[in-house]
Image: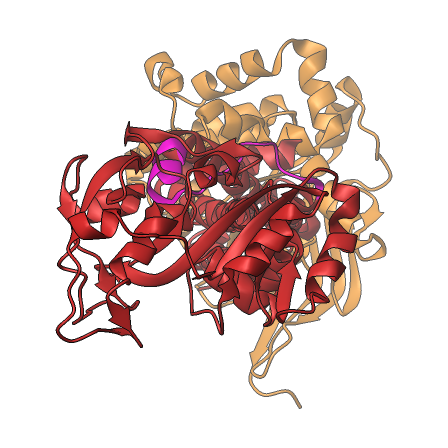
């Protein structure tokens, strides 16, 4: 934690209050509906610059956890503090804005708008986030930065020039998605099983490149997966079952 | 701006369905505007059936009846006008010209009109246009006939052909004036009026073919040959109606009243323009029906568009989730789909309007020639602009329907599509 804090000094960020990037305390959330699913998390934290693997089998509440983390839903009880901001206090539109300003998100698959070019897809967050746009433009043009990230994530120049995102392989698509998550250096990268569609070799290469770039941007990474084999790449491994209680069934 | 760009890109990605939707809307817009054009064109053509004539005089009857049989050759006169009354009217100082009309015979379903050569100069249609001859000229001989273009076309007649006139106005007539055949002396150019469907002969000819007739049948045992009839007095005893032109339009009401109050015979004088208006009022309900149908077609096209957007919605949930993950609010998603509906409709309206004018430009000569319908190529009138605007607005609102559904899905899904 300490060296992470000192790392912050190099490039000061706007919120320096808490040493944690994310802090869940006494959070409880129930999906509305006839068969509600409730997730309770007493305590969870993600350090700044930390690489954390959250393990849990499918159906254990990973999606709910990510929805809470990214501010898609707000907890019924408790607080979720992200970079010193209590997410529950923000309005819906403000949370949407907050999300793009501070989060880079990579899905399991189908990450890209099929009709957009690679550049369209990578630059998408910049259209919604003035902060990230400003950060990119401070260094040069957004196209240059997109190109740099795509190359750094292992995409050939010839592939980058190919217009349509739909024509890429799954592995290539995930690299483009990673570039989109990283562009403009958001503080937290959230990845939802981004390598589940990749083979072992590609997976390792992909994660190494992803981590190299996120370290350069001094971002924290939280990855959700059911694959324990990934543990070797991370600073810390947390099992969802250890921090969360999930109940399923009719509302009492 | 960005929303419009994304909506556009997304549409381009689904261009086949999008194109079909645009086409459906375009066709419906073409229909809507086209019906409007045909409607105004038909109304104009109708009003243009007769012009330059100030009064039509006939035996006393309703104005519609008189208009129908004298101008449109529909129905029959209730009574005749005596030759004396005709001459009395002709002698009125305010009367500039008068043309007699004598109806009652037919040729293969086409009405035969007995008149004089003044008819060809004084009968005007479509903003005062005069008749012209496509072939031949006005009748000179007693047994000459001038036929309208539809008659010539339908029966394949040319100048010089012999025709036989039937007694009565039925399509199939059993009694013919077979002993006195006519020669086609002239064929009139297309006018788009009932003239096209008329066989014109001289008033004397009408008299001549009926000279050996009585009570609507040949007098048995008495037959007068064409050569004999030429030597006889063929002064008409009665006519069916007359067209009157006045020296001054200001006198119209006075002369009309004078004729209506004519003491020796009950007569009616009508102003063709007024009677035409009255008639259009009667048949005008059909035009409203047409407008209603075309409006329904527009609604159908918009419904088709909503269906199209709705069906693609499910496969686009992923797209929505991606947009949400990069900070798009559900409102952006809503705007995206509403913009899509608006864009599609706008494109449809533009394509439809342009298509209509191109079609109008290409088809106009044909329509004019075939149906005698002159369609004006003028820019959309204010009420048409309003209609077009309303369609775009309706498209936008219709687009809100799937948009609201997407909004809900987007709220529920967030970034994670749980299918």
Q: Is residue A18 left or right of residue B45?
A: right
Q: How is the image coloured?
A: by chain
What tint does the image give chain A? orange
- Position of the N terminus of chain B by quadrant: top right
Q: Position of residue B233 (x, y in %)?
A: 34, 52
Q: Is residue B361 left or right of residue B148?
A: right
Instruction: Classify A241 as above or below B368.
Output: below
Q: Which chain is red?
A: B
- Position of the C terminus of chain B by quadrant: bottom left
Q: Is residue B97 magenta?
A: no
Q: Nearer the viewer, residue B68 or B145?
A: B145
Q: Which residues are magenta?
A: B364-382
Q: Position of residue A93 (x, y in %)?
A: 76, 49
Q: Position of residue B373 (x, y in %)?
A: 44, 43
Which residue is outermost to the bottom?
Answer: A252
Residue at the spot 81% in from the left edge and 23% down from the top edge: A12
Q: Position of residue A241 (x, y in %)?
A: 55, 66
Q: Is residue A9 left or right of residue B367?
A: right
Question: Residue B245's quadrant in the figure?
Answer: top right
Question: Residue A4's quadrant in the figure?
Answer: top right
Which residue is outermost to the top?
Answer: A140
């Amino acid at each position: 934690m300490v060296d992470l804090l000192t790392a912050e000094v190099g490039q000061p960020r706007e919120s320096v209050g808490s040493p944690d990037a994310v802090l869940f305390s006494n959070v409880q959330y129930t999906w509305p509906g006839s068969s509600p699913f409730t997730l309770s998390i007493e305590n969870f934290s993600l350090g700044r610059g930390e690489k954390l693997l959250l393990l849990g089998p499918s159906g254990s509440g990973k999606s709910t956890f990510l929805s809470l983390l990214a501010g898609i839903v707000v907890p019924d009880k408790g607080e979720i503090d992200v970079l010193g901001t209590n997410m529950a206090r923000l309005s819906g539109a403000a949370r949407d804005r907050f999300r793009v300003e501070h989060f880079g998100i990579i899905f399991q698959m189908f990450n890209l708008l099929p009709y957009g070019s690679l550049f369209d897809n990578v630059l998408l967050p910049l259209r919604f986030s003035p902060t990230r746009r400003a950060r990119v433009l401070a260094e040069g043009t957004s196209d240059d930065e997109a190109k740099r990230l795509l190359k750094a994530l292992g995409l050939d120049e010839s592939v980058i020039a190919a217009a349509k995102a739909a024509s890429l392989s799954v592995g290539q698509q995930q690299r483009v998605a990673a570039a989109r998550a990283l562009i403009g250096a958001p503080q937290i990268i959230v990845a939802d099983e981004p390598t589940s569609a990749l083979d072992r070799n590609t997976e390792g290469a992909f994660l190494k490149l992803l981590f190299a770039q996120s370290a350069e941007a001094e971002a924290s990474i939280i990855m959700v997966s059911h694959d324990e084999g990934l543990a070797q790449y991370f600073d810390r491994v947390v099992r969802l079952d250890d921090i969360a209680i999930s109940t399923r069934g009719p509302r009492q | 701006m960005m929303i419009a760009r994304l909506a556009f890109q997304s549409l381009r990605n689904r261009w086949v369905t999008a194109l079909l939707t645009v086409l459906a809307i375009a066709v419906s817009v073409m229909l809507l505007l086209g019906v409007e054009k045909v409607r105004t064109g038909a109304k104009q053509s109708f009003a243009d059936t007769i012009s330059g004539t100030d009064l039509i005089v006939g035996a006393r009857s309703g104005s519609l009846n008189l208009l129908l049989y004298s101008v449109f050759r529909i129905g029959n006169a209730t009574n005749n006008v005596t030759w004396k009354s005709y001459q009395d009217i002709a002698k009125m100082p305010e009367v500039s010209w008068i043309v007699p009309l004598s109806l009652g015979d037919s040729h293969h379903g086409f009405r035969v009109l007995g008149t004089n050569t003044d008819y060809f100069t004084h009968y005007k249609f479509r903003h005062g246009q005069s008749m012209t001859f496509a072939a031949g000229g006005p009748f000179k001989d007693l047994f000459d006939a001038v036929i309208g273009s539809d008659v010539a076309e339908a029966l394949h007649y040319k100048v010089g052909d012999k025709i036989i006139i039937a007694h009565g106005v039925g399509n199939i007539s059993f009694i013919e004036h077979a002993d006195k055949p006519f020669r086609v002396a002239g064929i009139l150019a297309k006018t788009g009026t009932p003239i096209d469907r008329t066989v014109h002969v001289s008033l004397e000819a009408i008299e001549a073919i009926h000279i050996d007739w009585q009570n609507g049948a040949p007098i048995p045992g008495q037959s007068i040959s064409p050569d004999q009839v030429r030597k006889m007095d063929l002064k008409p005893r009665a006519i069916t109606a007359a067209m009157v032109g006045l020296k001054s339009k200001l006198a119209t009401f006075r002369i009309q009243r004078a004729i209506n109050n004519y003491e020796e015979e009950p007569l009616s004088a009508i102003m063709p323009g007024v009677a035409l208006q009255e008639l259009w009022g009667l048949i005008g309900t059909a035009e409203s029906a047409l407008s209603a149908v075309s409006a329904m077609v527009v609604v159908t096209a918009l419904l088709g568009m909503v269906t199209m957007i709705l069906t693609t919605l499910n496969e686009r949930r992923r797209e929505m989730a991606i947009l949400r993950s990069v900070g798009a609010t559900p409102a952006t998603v809503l705007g995206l789909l509403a913009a899509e509906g608006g864009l599609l409709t706008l494109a449809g309206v533009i394509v439809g309007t342009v298509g209509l004018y191109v079609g109008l430009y290409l088809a106009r000569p044909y329509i004019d020639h075939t149906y005698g319908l002159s369609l004006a190529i003028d820019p959309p009138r204010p009420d048409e602009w309003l209609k077009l605007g309303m369609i775009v607005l309706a498209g936008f609102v219709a687009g809100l329907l799937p948009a609201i559904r997407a909004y809900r899905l987007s709220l529920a899904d967030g970034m994670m599509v749980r299918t």
